């Protein structure tokens, strides 16, 4: 053990006053150092010699943390400008979970046709799948404020036009055209993630925490949005949900875009033939499979609870899945990232729980199963989005994340349709086999690990997944 010796007095003599003073000062200094989480040196007096033994070096990779240091989320939002754009982000993101439910309730209530309402919302979803990646590409090329604001205004006008057309009994084609116009709504989640990536360059641990928070925010908004929309449409008037959503979207986007200091710089135009879609293709298949999980699980749960005479509990029970994902996302942000294969493996196992619970006929068992299944969602999405970050050039980050969201939406639509057919022909319990099968499909896609990562991106993926911030 390394040691430092200081001769204080001849052997056998009592320490001189100066020696005693120095010893006390060193002891007090060591005690103060120990209070900060650093092991103090050990001291002893051998005859007239003060021996100070230094503490052994810390184990490689070990982290010494001050107990009084702020948590990762407090550190995250202590950065200048982050609270402002996050507040706007949450306000603008909440309507994303409101518009679909609001449109269905408004159109069905005024026109008396759920078929028309479903067709209109499906058209809007298809338009979003086409328009959203182009909007994201423009945001990357010309900046968030320059593109997102006019795109948001156009989408808000589309929502207002839908209200007017429904209210005035306009021809049905006007409903399709109006709702399709809302497809220009910018991907606010992608823009927020792009800001975090710009602010947290070189801090992979903080970046992981930020991405976990963003996923938890997604789950929270998708949990609260439909509930708020249904409440407004039933307690106030049928158009209230759409009007409130449009107001929140515009207000939140204005607040978000006003925080210019955190906006990432405009990226140069990519080289011709840049194969972004090809690079992300395996990941997009994974996102499509997870979308199948979400869409089929939602429809199967609604139908199963309705068959039990508990249709009114569909919203609260489904909210448990989102709540589990939200909580797991926040916790995951404080932990070391896991491999994508491990996260998807947990998802595939837990998605079999609702199928087993539905077989018991117990609503309580189903609610508990959905809560547990939801806990695998956020870690999977956070880890998969980290791969998107690794494979996407910095100048096309918003476009890459929007492609991922588009794949998820496509999977949700396909999963909803497949679950509806399964409910009609096989029953509600058998329909729960679809999310379990989709989870298994996601695991099989992930098993081809090399196809999810280009060789040139290996170091970037490892650094994002394993490195920690210096302390």
Image (cartoon, rainbow, N blue to C red):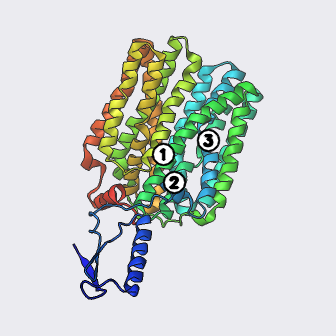
Identify the residue under disc 1.
Answer: 330
Nearer the N terminus, badge 1 or badge 2? 2
- Give the foreground label among 3 and 1: 1
Q: Is residue 58 among what the camera can see?
A: yes
The mark tally for this picture is 3
Identify the residue under disc 3.
Answer: 94
Percent x, y for residue 239?
A: 73, 31
Which element is circle 2 on?
Answer: helix
Percent x, y for residue 458?
A: 28, 58
Identify the residue under disc 2.
Answer: 73
Image-quadrant location for residue 64: bottom left
Nearer the N terminus, badge 2 or badge 3? 2
| Label 1 crowd bin: few (<14), some (14–19), many (20+), radius 10 Å | many
| Label 3 crowd bin: few (<14), some (14–19), many (20+), radius 10 Å | many
Tell me, yes or no, whether the two marked residues, 3 and 1, touch with CB atoms within 8 Å. no
Q: Is residue 316 above or below residue 138?
A: above
| Camera-nearest residue between 14 and 405 | 14
Percent x, y for residue 275?
A: 36, 55
Q: Residue at x 31, y 32 (%)?
A: 440
Q: Residue at x 29, y 85 (%)?
A: 13
Nearer the N terminus, badge 3 or badge 1? 3
Query: In the visual, does 349 lie left or right of 86?
Result: left
Determine the CA span between mark 3 and mark 1. 18 Å
Which element is circle 3 on?
Answer: helix
Percent x, y for residue 460?
A: 33, 60
Q: Is residue 173 among what the camera can see?
A: no
Tell me, yes or no, whether the two marked residues, 1 and 2, touch with CB atoms within 8 Å. yes
Which element is circle 1 on?
Answer: helix
Query: In the visual, does 175 lie left or right of 356?
Result: right
């Amino acid at each position: 053990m390394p040691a430092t010796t200081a001769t204080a007095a001849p052997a056998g003599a009592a320490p001189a006053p100066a020696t005693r003073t120095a010893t006390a000062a060193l002891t007090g200094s060591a005690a103060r150092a120990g209070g900060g989480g650093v092991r103090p040196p050990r001291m002893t007096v051998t005859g007239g010699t003060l021996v100070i033994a230094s503490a052994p070096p810390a184990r490689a990779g070990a982290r010494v943390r001050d107990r009084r240091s702020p948590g990762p989320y407090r550190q995250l939002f202590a950065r200048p400008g982050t609270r402002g754009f996050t507040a706007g982000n949450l306000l603008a993101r909440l309507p994303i979970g409101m518009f679909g439910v609001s449109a269905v309730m408004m159109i069905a209530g005024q026109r008396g046709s759920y078929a028309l309402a479903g067709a209109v919302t499906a058209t809007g979803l298809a338009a979003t799948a086409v328009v959203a990646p182009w909007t994201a590409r423009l945001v990357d090329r010309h900046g968030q404020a320059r593109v997102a604001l006019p795109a948001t205004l156009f989408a808000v006008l589309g929502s207002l036009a839908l209200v007017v057309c429904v209210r005035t009994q306009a021809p049905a084609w006007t409903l399709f055209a109006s709702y399709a116009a809302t497809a220009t709504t910018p991907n606010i989640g992608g823009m927020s993630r792009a800001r975090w990536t710009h602010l947290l360059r070189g801090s992979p641990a903080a970046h992981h925490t930020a991405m976990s928070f963003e996923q938890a925010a997604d789950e929270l908004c998708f949990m609260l949005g439909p509930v708020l929309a249904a409440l407004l449409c039933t307690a106030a008037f049928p158009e209230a949900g759409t009007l409130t959503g449009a107001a929140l979207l515009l207000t939140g986007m204005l607040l978000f875009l006003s925080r210019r200091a955190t906006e990432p710089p405009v990226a140069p135009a990519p080289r011709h033939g840049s194969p972004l879609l090809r690079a992300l293709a395996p990941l997009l298949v994974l996102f499509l499979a997870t979308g199948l999980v979400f869409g089929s699980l939602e429809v199967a749960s609604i139908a199963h609870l309705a068959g039990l005479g508990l249709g009114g509990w569909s919203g609260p029970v489904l909210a448990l899945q989102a709540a589990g994902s939200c909580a797991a996302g926040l916790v995951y942000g404080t932990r070391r990232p896991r491999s994508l294969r491990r996260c998807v493996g947990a998802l595939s196992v837990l998605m079999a729980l609702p199928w087993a619970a539905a077989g018991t006929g117990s609503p309580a068992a189903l609610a508990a199963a959905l809560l547990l299944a939801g806990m695998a969602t956020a870690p999977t999405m956070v880890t998969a989005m980290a791969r998107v970050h690794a494979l996407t050039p910095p100048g096309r980050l918003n476009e890459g994340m929007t492609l991922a969201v588009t794949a998820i939406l496509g999977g949700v639509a396909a999963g909803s349709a497949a679950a509806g057919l399964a409910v009609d022909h096989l029953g509600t319990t058998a329909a729960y086999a679809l999310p379990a099968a989709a989870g298994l499909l996601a695991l099989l896609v992930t098993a081809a690990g090399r196809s999810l990562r280009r060789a040139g991106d290996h170091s970037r993926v490892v650094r994002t997944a394993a490195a920690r911030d210096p302390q």
